[in-house]
Amino acid sequence: MFYPYGFGFDPTMIFLIPSIIFAMYAQAKVRTTFAKYLRVNGKKGYTGYQVARYILDHNGMRDVPIELTRGQLSDHYDPRKRVVRLSNEVYHSTSLASISVAAHETGHAIQHAHGYIPLSFRNAIFPVASFGSQAAWFFVIFGLIMSAPTLVNIGILLFTAAVLFQVITLPVEFNASSRAMRLLDEGGFIVGDEYNHSKKVLRAAALTYVAAMATAVSQLIRLLLIRGQRRD
């Protein structure tokens, strides 16, 4: 591992410890909550696919396809191809976890169709954020080795774009979950206590995005500290 202060312990790593612990907790929380409610079938017996298809059709989006995708918790909406992708256990299952996740992804599709501003902004900065998250450390490390502060600053600016992406992701995800709960309730897909159970699934999923933002912010603070120490 590269140590900006020379060989040995890097004190700036301390700023990452809380966010790393939080991220581990968030991942564990979403997996255990999803697994728990994957074993609880909805009383109405709808599959994740049926819920997603109904919601899309009743919101004038019959042209938006629903595809199977590999992996667990790999469900997502692709705004470039305008397609909802559901994992096998969400697509075919009638569990509360499955229909909650399916509704959440259709929430993103509805955001896109209605021109939801935070989603449009996130989609616009995605290319820069994606490049920034991958290239930032190259500029920072190379800049430190070469004693070139300009390169370090470029790296920090690139990483700032990645942090901004994580920050704007929060309202996008929270809004999609809020839409999902309303759609599930209004569509009659959940009844009684199922509403609270579905909410727990989506809250656990949202926690991972909070953790991702916290980690990104911590990394940015660390980069600023490294730059400041090198200037001294």
Image (spheres, rainbow, N blue to C red):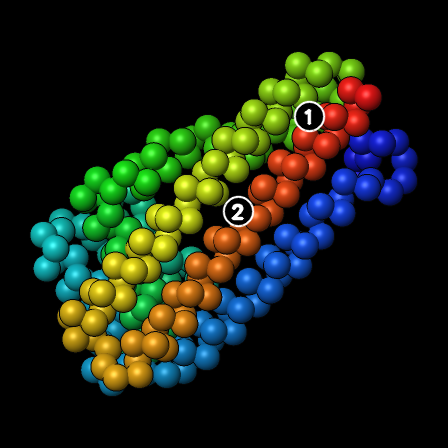
Residue 43 screen position, x and y as percent: 25, 85
Residue 62 shows in this picture: no
Q: Quadrant of the N terminus?
A: top right
Residue tagged by mark 2?
213
182 vs 101, nearest the viewer: 182
Q: Depth check: 84 or 156 in front?
A: 156
The first of marks 2 and 1 along the sequence is 1
Residue 191 percent location from the top left of the image: 23, 81
* Residue 27 in picture, x, y percent from top left: 55, 63
Q: Nearer the viewer, residue 73 or 104?
A: 104
Which residue is pictured at 75% across the width and 30% down the height?
A: 226
Q: Amino acid at mark 1?
A: Val
Q: Secondary structure at mark 2?
A: helix
Name the image quarter holding residue 185: bottom left
C-alpha gap between disc 2 and disc 1: 20 Å
Using the image, determine if residue 3 lies above or below residue 74: above
Q: Which residue is mark 1?
A: 140
In the image, 163: left or right of 183?
right
Residue in view at x 63 percent, y 43 percent: 218
Question: What's under tag 2, amino acid-wise?
Answer: Met
Per the image, label 1 sits on a secondary structure element best described as helix
| Numbered circle sitting on residue 52 | none
Above or below — where is 188 with respect to 107? below
